Amino acid sequence: MSSSEGGLTKPHLAHHFETIEKQDYAVRLGMWLFLGTEVLLFAGLFLGYTVYRHFYYEAFHQASRHLALWAGTTNTIVLITSSLSVALAYHAIKQNKKKQCAALLIFTILCAFVFLGIKAFEYREKFLEGALPGAHYHFAEVTAPGANLYYTIYFLSTGLHAIHVIVGMSILIWILARVLKGEFSATNYVPVELGGLYWHLVDLVWIFLFPLLYLI
Amino acid sequence: MAHEPAQTEAGKAEHHGHGAGRYWLVWAVLLACTGLTVYTGHYHPSIVVALVIAIFKASLVVLFFMHMTEAPGTNRLVFSVSLVFTMVLMLGVFGDLLTRNPMSLPGGAPPSEFHAAP
């Protein structure tokens, strides 16, 4: 932990920017552009879901009832709460409260582990039941045509989302290490802000995945 | 930009527009909406209700957790364009699927079932 609790650090100014303000403007715009591409990446999967749900409505309905609703609901609460804590971490560093920022980031990272743990438990259940994608499907309780397509989309979309959770968690661990080293302060907080934005995107995607997969 | 050390953070909070209370309020509303979507989804499943709640929740996250309310116009434009193109993608594909001859649809969905699906 940095001993200089009141220490204000300056962000590194890249040589191709004239001022910190221009650099901040550019990196924020770049982040939003990237988030836009992320939305489109998931849009493709949501489209696949919508099309197949339309054709295999009954199979999708039956298959969704075999997901663990308690697990999905708990994970939703965990992600929403972690979104709150990362927003509060950003708020704390803007006020130069480095210890509070670090504590909130640790809480967020723990939430990510809880999310992945519950997800792993759910995946294990599906593997044991044989509710698997494509040709590997052998789940006896849902035999309506198209049920394997539901699980293909389920594993693809939640798997891609889980990869995003792991990436977001890794970014937050890296940011936490830099907060603990005292690199960020009320005058240098944009990386905390951008890491937080990525984490909110992870929450955003789950807000749509949860009702579409668990509650149809 | 804040230039004072931690002891005077109260003064800076007003400089940055709002305190931490707003985040807690948004969190409470998001939790309430989650409860609502689980209740309606479990007892009265409806894709429309589920999507309306999800869009409302997502808007809260984007506007307040991601500070879109304070973002400059370019950032809003860039993100909105991705949402517009998502709609174009959906409308284009469904415009095609819904106007196809039933014979060209997947074998698992006879025309009657296709039209009965809500």
Image: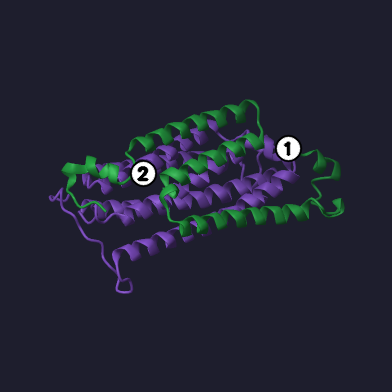
Secondary structure of the residue carrying tag 2 is helix
Query: Looking at the rendered structure, which numbered label has been put on residue A58?
Result: 1
Q: Position of residue A118 (x, y in %)?
A: 46, 38
Q: Amino acid at mark 1?
A: Glu
Q: Position of residue A216 (x, y in %)?
A: 64, 36
Mark closer to the chain start, 1 or 2: 1
User: Which chain did the image draw in purple?
Assistant: A
Q: Nearer the viewer, residue A111 or A197?
A: A197
Dot 2: chain letter? A
Q: Position of residue A96 (x, y in %)?
A: 22, 48
- The answer to whether A79 is drawn above or below residue A43 in the figure is above
| Quarter of the image where one finds residue B41 | top right
Dot 1: chain letter? A
Q: Nearer the viewer, residue B107 or A18?
A: A18
Kindly tell me whether residue A140 is visible in this rendering.
Answer: no
Q: How many marks?
A: 2
Q: Mark 1 and mark 2: span between their CA atoms? A: 40 Å
Determine the residue positioned at 56% across, 32% down: B37
Given this view, does label 1 or label 2 mark the residue nearer the observer?
A: 2
What colour is chain B? green
Q: Position of residue A86 (x, y in %)?
A: 35, 44
Determine the residue positioned at 40% across, 37% down: A81
Query: Looking at the rendered structure, which numbered label has been put on residue A87?
Result: 2
Q: Nearer the viewer, residue A107 or A70?
A: A107
